[in-house]
Image (spheres, helix red, strand yellow):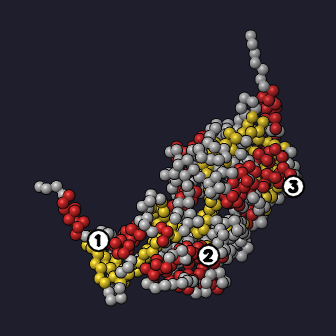
Amino acid sequence: MCTIDKPAWQERYADKVVSAERAVACVRHGQRVFLGSGAAEPRTLVEALAAREDLADTEIVHILTLGVAAYAQPRFSDRFRHNAYFIGPNVRNAVAEGRADYTPIFLSEIPMLFRSGRVGIDVALIGVSTPDEHGYCTYGVSTDIVKAAAESARVVIAEVNAQMPRVWGNCLIHVRDLDKLVPSDQPVLEAVQGEPDELSQRIAGHVANLVEDGATLQLGVGKIPDAILHNLEGFKDLGIHTEMFSDGILPLIEKGVITNAKKTLHRGKTVASFVMGSRKLYDFIDNNPSVEFYPTEYVNDPYIIARNDKMISINAALEVDLTGQVCADSLGIVFYNGIGGQVDFTRGAARSKGGKPIIVLPSTAANGTISRIVAQLKPGAAVTTSRADVHYVVTEHGVAYLHGKSIRERAMALIQIADPLFRPCLLNEAKTRNLVYADQIDLTPATPLYPDELERWITLRDKTKAFMRPLKLTDERLFREMFYKLSDRSVHNRFFHMIEALPHEKLQAFLRVDYDADMALVVLTDSSENAEMIGIAHYSKNPRTNIADSAYLVRDDCQGRGIGTILLNALIDAARAHGIAGFTADVLSTNLTMLRLFHKCGYTVQSELEEDGEYKVTIAFSKKRRRARARSAKSKPKN
């Protein structure tokens, strides 16, 4: 009869199995104890440690955990003191009240603290999956900084959870490297997210406009990241390289939106360092070779991040000042979160080919009573991401692109995406601090919302694409640059006399529209931060007659491509949507192109030549051209 000997690791495994109480008995006074992260927190071990009444002056270190954190309660202050590398809800009060410490540090750099010995780990309490036939466990739902802690600690105690997913990647630890083992069989902690609300959806819509097919994404957990994912269903071949993800990516994987097929690093793989979500998410990653987990010193390394082309990082902020400084880890003097991976991914995405680092935040807090776009950060507030690192800032009111922009341009861009109620105050404070022009047109609390529903891609006559949207107060540079590329003929046709220069004091009058009685639409070469303005159309309503005067301008090198026709039709649609009865326009008799454009608009057009050689053109929206009606009548079948 043939018998098969057990592998040697199985015998060692059995020798290391102890109860949780016996396992944590090795912890001594004054030692530093590391706890496993997030949903992989070894709860049985943590409870046993908290029950030790004979301990004193024990330091507990970790990033975000989902457990109860009894060690951070006031009654245990003589036994334990927590040092947070990221402040989660379960230790926030302890840090705020001075019963726990906070160490601000980039997530990518925490592992080096452990490996270098600068922060020596005496005992690491970690959660792992059950070993495979070769004796290897995985770190399950959290590899992040756990791997570095486990490989650096003097003693490693593992809670071997039968319900912990077994995952792929650089996330293995052998039984021989575990000093004590505590078997358990309990559900992995869940962090189930609610449905995105309207505010999150509005922010997500603006972010989605910045995403391209084949982009690689980094985003976290919460209503805004989930709302962003909801808005990406029409995209193709998106990839994931992120410190963490949640359930929000599952529908996009199921629908073939997230394929990782275009990634330039780890092609075909979703890459993360930890996950937090529902049991459905944990079942999805279990033994799934398409998802790979790596430690944060790799996933969050800006150099590694930058190797992903079209890398898009999306990170949240608590407030942003008018110069672009981002605070994400404190509310004034009160530490609230942590630096985490925001700076790691912001810098990595900025260096990626086609990358876009994005900061997102609602424009207000406290039920709309506090602006989160501020003239200056609260006293004591930390600058998490410097103004030089910030590229895109997104609120529900739009997108502000800051990189390479002057302080004046930054301030105006951020005021534009602040809540309308706070824009006048922000502008006044910006003037007081000389951040913007002293004669900048004032804003009122009744400042209208930007009509982002009018944004759309258009196809020109030569089959190329362009981007059309409403004019913004921040388009001063684009308008100026277009103006100085116009020929004398185009300037004369638009303004009826020659204008040599268009300085700020003249130009800003063109930029103020209320999107109702006044409307301006612009055509840009694309929707990126490098776009050029190539056309603009504007109307201004006469409230007495309900007729709007309109004007049009297309850059010389872009004329003949159908831009004028598209602008006229779009402007008519906008005017009719606001109940305007018609347009008037003054056109030089020599401007035959514009005259033909009006007469082809599909409405009845009257042109009257005045003594000064100008045509007064009138378009009545209520009257379709007779010829159009006649053609329609001829096409009807006879009875």
Return the x and y of residue 56 as percentages of the image width and height. 85, 55
- Callout 3 secondary element: loop
Disc 1 or disc 3, which is closer to the eye? 1
- Callout 1 secondary element: strand
Query: Could you say which quadrant of the image residue 494 lies in?
Result: bottom left
Which three-letter amino acid code belongs to the residue tagged 3? Arg
Q: Is residue 49 among what the camera can see?
A: no
Q: In the rendered picture of this protein, how many numbered marks are placed on residues?
A: 3
Which three-letter amino acid code belongs to the residue tagged 1? Tyr
Residue 409 shows which numbered tag? 2
Q: Which residue is mark 3?
A: 118
State whether residue 210 is above or below residue 191. below
Q: Which residue is mark 1?
A: 603
Q: Quadrant of the C terminus?
A: bottom left
Label whose residue precedes the other's in the sequence (1 or 2): 2
Q: Is residue 384 left or right of residue 436?
A: right
Residue 404 shows which numbered tag? none
Q: CA distance from mark 1 to mark 2?
A: 41 Å
Q: CA distance from mark 1 to mark 3?
A: 77 Å
Q: Is residue 537 left or right of residue 271?
A: left
Find the residue positioned furthest to the top: 1
Q: CA distance from mark 3 to mark 2?
A: 43 Å
Find the residue positioned furthest to the left: 639
